[in-house]
Amino acid sequence: MTEQLPQKLRSDAEDNRDRILESARALFASEGLTVPMRAIARQAGVGPATLYRRFPTKQLLATEAFAEQTRACQAIVDEGLAMPDPWQGFCWVIERICELHLQNRGFTDAFLATYPDTVDIAESRELTLKSVATLARRAKARGRLRKDFELSDLMIMLTAHRGLHVSDPATRSTASRRFATLVMQAFVSGP
Amino acid sequence: MTEQLPQKLRSDAEDNRDRILESARALFASEGLTVPMRAIARQAGVGPATLYRRFPTKQLLATEAFAEQTRACQAIVDEGLAMPDPWQGFCWVIERICELHLQNRGFTDAFLATYPDTVDIAESRELTLKSVATLARRAKARGRLRKDFELSDLMIMLTAHRGLHVSDPATRSTASRRFATLVMQAFVSGP
DNA sequence: GACTATGTGGACGCAGGCGTCCACTTAGCT
DNA sequence: AGCTAAGTGGACGCCTGCGTCCACATAGTC
């Protein structure tokens, strides 16, 4: 939707914009959304004014920076939907989503943000969740997904998964995979 | 262990100390360990100097403030150990611990803290974990606890559970209970 | 009631984040 | 090459949190 900019920027401005986005992606991913705007500017090698001129709010910057993740997230769910076995698809989605969110702390923050005055990507989230709902419906009917599963369960698990970001990076990846395994077990329907 | 203070304080100082601890408990519980020292001082109706004189570091203040939770946490596990059915005891521990940690954000922070220069309550944690290990061993042998369960799984789940604190208070409690339910299911041994 | 050691609040200086303003630079056009 | 509007970095003022210092207050003792 933001494929073409309304008006052309001067070439140096365009370069700066690109570098800002690049830095923002890197820092949002590793530090989360709390990273200071100035840190992004510094890493991009520009002054604060340049950053604020291009992206007046962190929200705007993040929306742009996460365009790729947003697409990746949707792609994961679509791929899960395309799998012949819906339960297998569901598990695959859980695993891959955990992986994606682990690599990108800021994206998780944005994906889960519901408090006001915070970066949010509500639009893309709603789309993705709609697809997950479809997948879940199928996995209940023709798979081993527990019948009382609700979308909010997934949000709870993602919210919880974000909590893992505080642990040290070395163990984080292991913890995330184990978490995904346990979550899948938790979603299996009762005996 | 810190039952009696080494030397008696002046009566007004004693009062202030009590009020500081009371405020610290309330604020740590609701805001977590990140609450500014000054906020605690303000709520207690004392100046910063008074607070710092009594508790030079947040670590010392927190250790004192959480003495009660520390005991409660141990008591929960002991009670779980005393139950005839170890699996039932294990589930009970999970539920109650989630509940305790939900009510007290700061306590969770301290309980899980492993990064340096942070409030930690390592001593009590190790004791509690030792008891949980015993309970888990029994629940594997004579219960439905999955055979590959490790203590780190519990830490992963508690770390994740802390993530729920970011959601709004109204839904938090529901989310926590649902989380506990799902976690127990996750820990059931395979078919 | 007077004395003194203990205890106290407010002020201080430091650090770091915020968003904006402004004098200088420079891309892009002629 | 010269012009000009777009673009820029650094400086600025504001805020909030930090831990410490010191002149004043007061509990406990005589």
Image (cartoon, coloured by chain):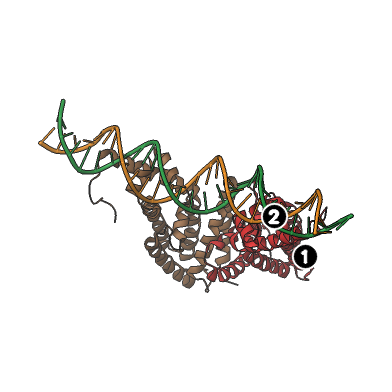
Chain colours: A brown, B red, C orange, D green
Is there any visible trace of residue B162 in the rendered image? Answer: yes
| Quadrant of the image occupied by residue B41 | bottom right
Kind of residue sitting beneath label 1: Asp
Dot 1 crowding, Cα within 10 Å, few <14, some 14–19, many 20+: some
* Residue at numbered disc 1: B78
Going from N to C along the chain, the mark reached first, 1 or 2, is 2
On screen, residue A31 versus residue A171, left or right, reads left
Asked which quadrant contains residue B139, the reply is: bottom right
Mark 2 crowdedness (10 Å alpha carbons): few <14, some 14-19, many ≥20: many
Q: How many marks?
A: 2
Tell which subunit mark 2 falls on. Answer: B
Residue A6 position in % (x across, y down): 23, 52
Please name whichever residue, A45 or A123, is drawn nearer the observer in this view of the structure.
Answer: A45
Q: Quadrant of the N terminus of chain B?
A: bottom right
Q: Where A58 falls versus A90 (above or below)?
A: above
Screen quadrant of the C terminus of chain B: bottom right
Q: Nearer the viewer, mark 1 or mark 2?
A: 2
What's under tag 2, amino acid-wise?
Answer: Leu
Q: How many angstroms separate mark 1 from mark 2 (CA)?
A: 26 Å
Splitting the image into 4 quarters, where does residue B127 fall?
bottom right
Image spot of residue B2 (x, y percent)? 80, 56
Residue at image x 33%, y 43%?
Answer: A17
Q: Which mark is residue B61?
A: 2
Marks 1, 2 in one chain: yes
Q: Secondary structure at mark 2?
A: helix
> Toward the viewer: B12 or A21?
B12
Q: Is residue B99 left or right of B1 when viewed as pictured?
A: left
* Subunit ID for the residue under disc 1: B
Q: Position of residue A139 (x, y in %)?
A: 47, 68
